[in-house]
Image (cartoon, grey):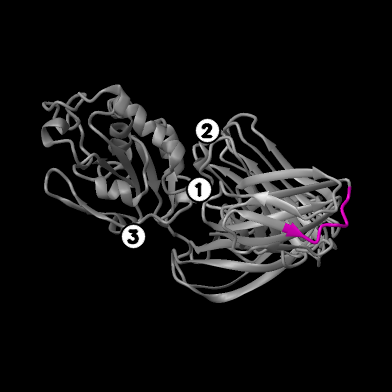
Amino acid sequence: MKQLTTCLFISFAFFASAQLPNGSVAPDFTITDIEGEEHNLYSYLDSGYAVIIDFSATWCGPCWNYHTSGVFEEIYDAHGPDGTNEVRILFIESDDNTTDDDLHGTGTSTWGDWTAGVEYPIADNGGNVFDLYQCAYYPTIFTVCPNRIIQQTGQATAAAHIGYFQSGACAPASTPNDVSLLEYLGPNRTCPNTPTPLSVKVMNQGTEPLTSFTLAATTLFGAELLTYEWTGNLDTYEMEVVELGEAIFPSTSMFFIDVISEDDYDGNNSVSETMNMSNEVATSLVRVRFTTDNMPGDNRWSIYDDGGNEVAGIAFGDMTENNTEYTWWVNLETLGCYNFEVYDLIGNGGAIECDISSFNDQGVNINTIFTVNNNGNWNQLNKGFLVNEMNTNISEHQAPSVTLYPNPTNGLLTINGSENASNNQQVWITDASGKIVFDQSRVRSNNAWMLNLESLDPGFYVLRFQNGNQFETKQFIRE
C-alpha cells in the first residue's frame, strides 16, 4: 500500500492550486465503466438528472472511509434509477497508476474491494477527467446540476447531498420563464464619487427562450443604484454576462442585484456583494517596496485600474534574492480609482515586508497607502486608492539637471552637475528587475561625484539621485 506521505502530498496540493470553482460550467466527458458501459455527462444532465462525481484513488484512506460509509448507496437506492430517478452517481478512480486488482482489493495499492456492494457505475483510469476538472486532491466530490453548474459538495451526509440536488438552485428547467442570476462579476472596490461598472452572470433556467428581463441594483437599505432592461435570446441553460452600467456608491455598502420583471420562480433572482470604499488618496507617482523572505519566488504584486486592467506589477519568480529589498517606481497615467494587490503562492504569508507610497512633485512621500507586515496565513491582500493629482514631473522632480559619464561605463561612473548640493545626497542604483544593487550617500560637497561600479555585472541600470528633497532619475549601461 502506498505510504501516508503520498496522501499528505495530494492534500497539500490543494493549497497551491484548486479545482474548478463553484458556479463553473462543468466540462462534458464520456467515460466507460468497468462493466463496459459508456456514460456521457451532458446526456444525463439534458435528461434532467443531477450527477454526483466522486474522484477518488484506491490508496487514499479518506476516500475509502467515505466510500464505505454507505452515503452513496443510500442516495442511489432512494433517488437513483430504481428510486425517485433524480440523480446519477459516477465513481471515477483517478490515479492511472493503480490497477484493476487495486480496484477489486487484491492489489498492492488499495484499502479493499471498492466494487463490493456498489450498484452505481465505477470507472477506472479517469485521470484525464480528474485533470479536466482541475482537481488537486482526493477525494474531490462534485454535484453537477442539470443546468451544468457545478458545486463541490464534498464528503457530506446523504441528507446534505439530497438537500442540494433537490433544491431550487439545482432543479432542472420546469417553468417557461425563469431568469437565474448565477454570480456577481463586477468590482467589489471603488472610490468616492467614482462610477463603478456592475455586471452579473445570467442563465435561462426556463423551458422557453428568454428574450427580455429587467434588473435592479439597490443598496442594503433599499436605495436604488440603477435599473437595466435586457433584450436578446437565450435558449434553456444558455448564459450571458450582463453589463448593467455604472453606479456611484455613497460609502462601503452591501448591495443586491435582483430580477424585478415577471418571473416564474423567484428563488434564483438575486445576488449580493459588498462594495468597499477606498478612501486613501495618492498622486500618480507611487513607489512599491518589497523585502523578501527565504522564498522570494512565492510573492508578486499588481496594480489594477478601475476597469480591472493590470497597469503595473511583477510575476511570481521575478524576485529571486532572499531577504532582499526590491523597489519599483510606477507612473500611473490617469486619474481614478486603483487597487493594489499582493499575493503569496503557498498561502503562508511568509516573513515579508511590503508597502506602497505616493510622492509629490518635490519627491516627498505624502501618503503610505498600504503596509504589509506578515501576520499569519494569507494568499492575497489588497488595498484601494484614489489618484486625484497628476505628478507631471515624474522623472525630474524639479531637481537640478545632472549628467552621467561615461555612459556606457566600464565601471567608474561620474555624476556631474550636482554642485548645488544640499547637506545630504543619496544615490540608489537598481538593476533591470528593480532590485537595489548599489547605494551610497555623502554630505555637502561641490565636487563631481565618482562612483566605483566595477562590481556590477554588465547590463542596464537605473540611477536615482537625491539632493535634499529633490530627485532625478537617469539610466546607464555597464559594459
Using residue 104 as the reference point, say whether residue 230 is left or right of it: right
* Residue 278 is one of the magenta-drawn residues: no
Graded by Cα atoms within 10 Å as few (under 14), some (14 to 19) or many (20 or more), the crowding at tag 3 reads: some
Residue ID at (76%, 44%): 441
- Give the magenta part as a residue range: 415-422
> Is 430 drawn above or below residue 331 in the view shown?
above
Identify which residue, 184 or 230, lies in the foreground. Answer: 184
Q: What residue type is labelled 2?
A: Asn
Sequence-first tag of 2 and 3: 3
Seen from the viewer's position, the closer of residues 254 and 357 is: 357
Q: Where is residue 344 in the image (x, y as percent from the top left)?
A: 55, 40
Residue hosting label 2: 294
Disc 2 crowd, CA 10 A, few/some/many (<14, 14-19, 20+): some
Secondary structure beneath label 2 = loop
Q: Nearer the viewer, mark 3 or mark 1?
A: 1
> Which sits earlier in the primary sequence, circle 3 or circle 1?
3
Residue 46, numbered circle: 3
> Residue 440's x, y, as percent?
72, 44
What secondary structure is the magenta-colored segment mainly?
loop
Label 1 sits on a secondary structure element that is loop
Q: Where is residue 37 in the image (x, y as percent from the top left)?
A: 15, 50
Q: Which mark is residue 316?
A: 1
Horizontal side, residue 80 vs residue 250: left or right: left
Q: Which amino acid does label 3 sit on?
A: Asp
Q: Nearer the viewer, mark 2 or mark 1?
A: 2
Measuring 37% from the left and 40% from the top, which residue is drawn there?
A: 136
Q: Give the Cα separation between the discs numbered 3 and 1.
A: 42 Å
Point out which mark residue 169 bears: none
Q: Which amino acid does label 1 sit on?
A: Phe
User: Which quadrant is home to the N terminus?
Assistant: top left
Gap between marks 2 and 1, in whole Å?
14 Å
